[in-house]
Image (spheres, helix red, strand yellow):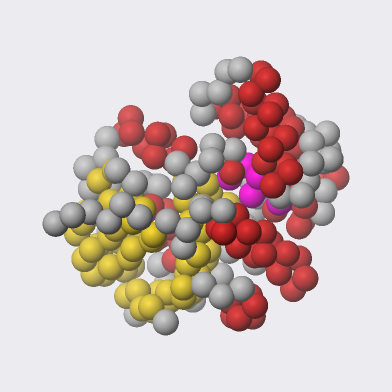
Amino acid sequence: MEQNVNCLVDYENVDICQQEHLVLKDVDFHVNKGEFIYLLGKVGSGKSSLLKSLYAEVPIKKGTARIFNYDLRKIKRREIPLLRRKVGIIFQDFQLLIDRTVQENLSFVLKATGWKNKNKIEEQIAFVLRCVGMENKGYKMPHQLSGGEQQRIVIARALLNSPELIIADEPTGNFDPETANEIVSLLHDICSSGTSVIMATHNINLINAHPGKVIRCEGMELKEF
């Protein structure tokens, strides 16, 4: 059977477990290039486990699971860092290094993922900060930024290695409606440039304002709406 070249993620009949506990069963989940997917579900419904399985933090022991050119059932430990460079991850709690400036935070990530040329590092940081509207904030420390500004920096960090897929786990969970709307609008802009986005959220209003494919984790299953 010919593989769909536009398909980044291809899960069929996958079981996802945390430790030995089954949280999702018989999962069929597909992500195409340039697609924006909302992942809904109550706390404990398996959203985060599904997202973590995509970058091999949660292992998959049943079914067929491919992301990019990697078979997640057979992926080798040495391949996992290479996979994660192709995925931009946005956390709810930022995980910025609080003792370094924005510029130093972003430089740290690039150096850790193999970038060595100082000029190219500076150019890439300038580029991603422009993408998120934070081009004049590189000298700031994280505590000098608002929550919404910090999340924009986290999105910039996720863009550093030009990922094909962005995974955002409740990126607006701590924000007021206006800031949440700005963050989702920014993610949609990134998606429109060709990067696929999977975003876990509880906020139905955001989905109404910024439509995308909606998938719900419910009763240990994935259901598309």
On screen, residue 123 versus residue 45, left or right, reads right
In this orientation, which residue lies closer to the viewer: 210 or 83?
210
- Image point 27% across, 56% down: which residue? 4
- Image point 32% across, 75% down: which residue? 221
Residue 110 coordinates in the image, percent (x, y)? 59, 29
Residue 96 coordinates in the image, percent (x, y)? 67, 42
Residue 48 coordinates in the image, percent (x, y)? 46, 61
**Can you say which quadrant of the picture contains the N terminus?**
bottom left
**Can you say which quadrant of the picture contains the C terminus?**
bottom left
Residue 94 coordinates in the image, percent (x, y)? 65, 50
Number of numbered discs on residues: 0
Residue 223, by quadrant, is bottom left
In this orientation, which residue lies closer to the viewer: 184 or 1?
1
In this orientation, which residue lies closer to the viewer: 208 or 64?
208
Q: Is residue 54 magenta?
A: no
* Magenta stretch bounds: 152-158
On screen, residue 113 versus residue 15, left or right, reads right
